């Protein structure tokens, strides 16, 4: 499969994946990953036993907790967790004979320096992104030159699937940070040969600066975090700006509610745009990759177009670990098959996908790659909420967020989690701060929302406070924070 192509007969893709998985485990992961060599040995798995994607089920899962445990074990070398680390000793000891011969041949023919340089290019980490780590240990992942070349491949594919043409321009308002979203977007622009300006979002140039830039370069595409993109467009609309040139919005969010899409599309139409399309993206730090939807009508999602020559996605039953079939709900599990640097096998994302993975060609763009349903509930990094009625509402908080984003009469919102009477031994309380769009009846809104929230997510707000949109902007620190504070946890830490 050519690295640029996302069209390919399905049977060939499966064979390609089997071959790459085999090669990756035998020649890279098992010899050079201390963690996975240990895991294979402990479970008496021989690297040669993993011959096909189906054989993955023999390997125990890796999780975020595995990362955290490794980092805690050796905090001064946290970057080494899951890193491929070849040295002369492990090369001699664990590399298959055939590969070893290839190394020796290279040394004899081209010299020691050449071999050294090619190993460095492949294995020496030169780039890092990390998880945001607002409530937990940030997880660092490392990239080598080899991985940065892959990042360019993903970037090109993203540009292609989103349908960005060479004569179109992109404004990137992801916050400037060592995060995957910002850097992959930058790499996509460079690799795709697209004019892109990366402003760093609100924190670096302010919303006024972003609006000025929009008006100056007149991009067709705007990409960023949903809350900030909304804030930027709302501010421009309040200033009655003409943004008729802008009609493609790409959001750094796996699940974008139709109501939110309609609100964004409405704002753009008020500013003169037509034929607005809004695309979601799914990605996570540990994968060093992201997947996008192709352009469709606002009510439809194509799902996320994956890269089967680079990774294997499985959907599992989160309780039993059993692998699910096509289109079935479950938790997304990710495996590298063509990477260096920080590599994972069967990495449990904690993200739950309704509708699973589809293997049929995309009905909208015709690409033949597996697609992940965009009905994804991300793993929350907010600690369990203990309400008086329901004990564990981890997933419900995400669903609650989705429900609020979907409401077209809501301008902006924030949820605050506190303890009843500020007593650390009491139950948790959920307080909603909300600003409504004009012409909304508050009593009607409150009654309707409470009913709907209770029915859909089985929790309810202890209080709903109506405030101005300015107050929400201040509360969520939308202008200054790297990640806007949509849900704040004010419970005492214990
Ligand atoms: Zn498509």
Image (spheres, grey):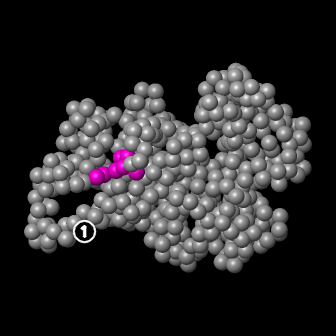
Q: Which residue is painted at 26% across and 49% down in the image?
A: 32
Give the residue at x 77% y 53%: 473
**Is 160 one of the magenta-colored residues?**
no
Query: Where does the image place residue 183, in percent across and percent down from the top left?
Result: 51, 63
Considering the image in quadrants, where does the C terminus appear? top right
Q: Position of residue 210 (x, y in %)?
A: 70, 69
Q: Main secondary structure of the magenta part?
A: loop
Res 38 → quadrant? top left
Estimate the x, y position of residue 126 in percent, counting from the top left.
39, 63
Q: Residue furthest toward the front?
A: 76
Above or below, comparing residue 205 to residue 54 in the picture: below
- Left or right for 123, reference 273: left
In front here: 324 or 347? 347
Q: Is 466 or 362 nearer to us in this picture?
A: 466
The secondary structure type at the circle numbered 1 is: helix
State the image quarter where residue 219 is shown: bottom right
Residue that appears at 17% across and 47% down: 94
For label 1, the residue is 117
Instruction: Tell me if 294 is positioned left or right of 471 in this view.
Output: left
Q: Residue at x 13, y 67 (%)?
A: 107
Q: Quadrant of the N terminus?
A: bottom left
Q: Is mark 1 within 8 Å of ligand 1?
A: no
* Mark 1 Cα shell of 10 Å, populated few (<14), some (14-19), many (≥20): few
Q: Which residues are magenta?
A: 79-85
Give the total of numbered labels: 1
**Please, is residue 293 above or below residue 418 in the view?**
below
Q: Work out whether residue 457 can be spotted.
A: yes
């Amino acid at each position: 499969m050519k690295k640029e192509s996302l069209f390919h007969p399905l049977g060939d893709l499966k064979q390609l994946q089997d071959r790459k998985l085999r090669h990756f485990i035998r020649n890279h992961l098992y010899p050079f990953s201390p963690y996975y060599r240990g895991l294979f040995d402990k479970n008496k798995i021989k690297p040669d036993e993993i011959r096909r994607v189906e054989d993955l089920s023999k390997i125990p899962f890796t999780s975020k907790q595995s990362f955290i445990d490794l980092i805690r074990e050796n905090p001064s070398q946290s970057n080494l967790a899951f890193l491929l680390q070849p040295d002369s000793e492990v090369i001699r000891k664990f590399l298959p004979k055939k590969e070893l011969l290839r190394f020796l041949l290279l040394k004899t023919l081209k010299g020691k320096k050449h071999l050294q340089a090619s190993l460095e290019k492949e294995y020496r980490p030169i780039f890092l992104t990390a998880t945001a780590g607002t409530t937990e240990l940030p997880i660092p992942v490392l990239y080598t030159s080899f991985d940065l070349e892959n990042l360019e491949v993903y970037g090109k594919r993203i540009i292609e699937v989103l349908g960005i043409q060479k004569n179109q321009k992109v404004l990137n308002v992801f916050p400037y940070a060592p995060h995957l979203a910002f850097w992959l977007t930058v790499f996509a622009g460079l690799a795709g040969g697209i004019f892109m300006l990366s402003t760093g979002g609100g924190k670096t140039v302010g919303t006024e600066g972003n609006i000025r830039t929009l008006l100056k370069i007149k991009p067709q595409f705007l990409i960023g975090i949903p809350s900030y993109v909304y804030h930027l467009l709302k501010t421009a609309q309040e200033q009655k700006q003409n943004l008729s040139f802008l009609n493609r919005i790409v959001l750094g969010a796996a699940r974008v509610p139709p109501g939110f899409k309609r609100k964004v599309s409405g704002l753009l139409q008020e500013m003169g745009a037509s034929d607005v399309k809004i695309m979601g993206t799914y990605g996570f730090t540990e994968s060093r990759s992201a997947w996008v939807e192709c352009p469709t009508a606002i009510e439809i999602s194509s799902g996320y177009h994956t890269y089967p020559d680079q990774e294997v996605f499985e959907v599992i039953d989160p309780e039993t670990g059993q692998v699910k079939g096509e289109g079935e709900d479950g938790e997304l599990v990710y495996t590298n098959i063509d990477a260096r640097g920080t590599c994972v096998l069967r990495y449990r994302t904690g993200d739950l996908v309704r509708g699973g993975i589809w293997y049929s060609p995309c009905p909208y763009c015709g690409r033949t790659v597996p697609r992940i349903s965009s009905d994804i509930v991300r793993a929350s990094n907010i600690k369990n909420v203990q309400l008086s009625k329901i004990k564990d509402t981890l997933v419900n908080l995400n669903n609650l967020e989705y429900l609020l984003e979907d409401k077209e009469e809501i301008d902006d919102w924030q949820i605050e989690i506190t303890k009843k009477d500020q007593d650390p031994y009491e139950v948790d309380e959920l307080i909603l701060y909300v600003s409504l769009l004009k012409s909304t009846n508050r009593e009607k809104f409150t009654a309707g929302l409470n009913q709907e929230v209770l029915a859909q997510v089985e929790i309810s707000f202890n209080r709903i406070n109506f405030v101005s949109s300015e107050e929400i902007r201040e509360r969520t620190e939308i202008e200054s924070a790297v990640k806007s504070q949509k849900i704040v946890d004010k419970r005492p830490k214990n």
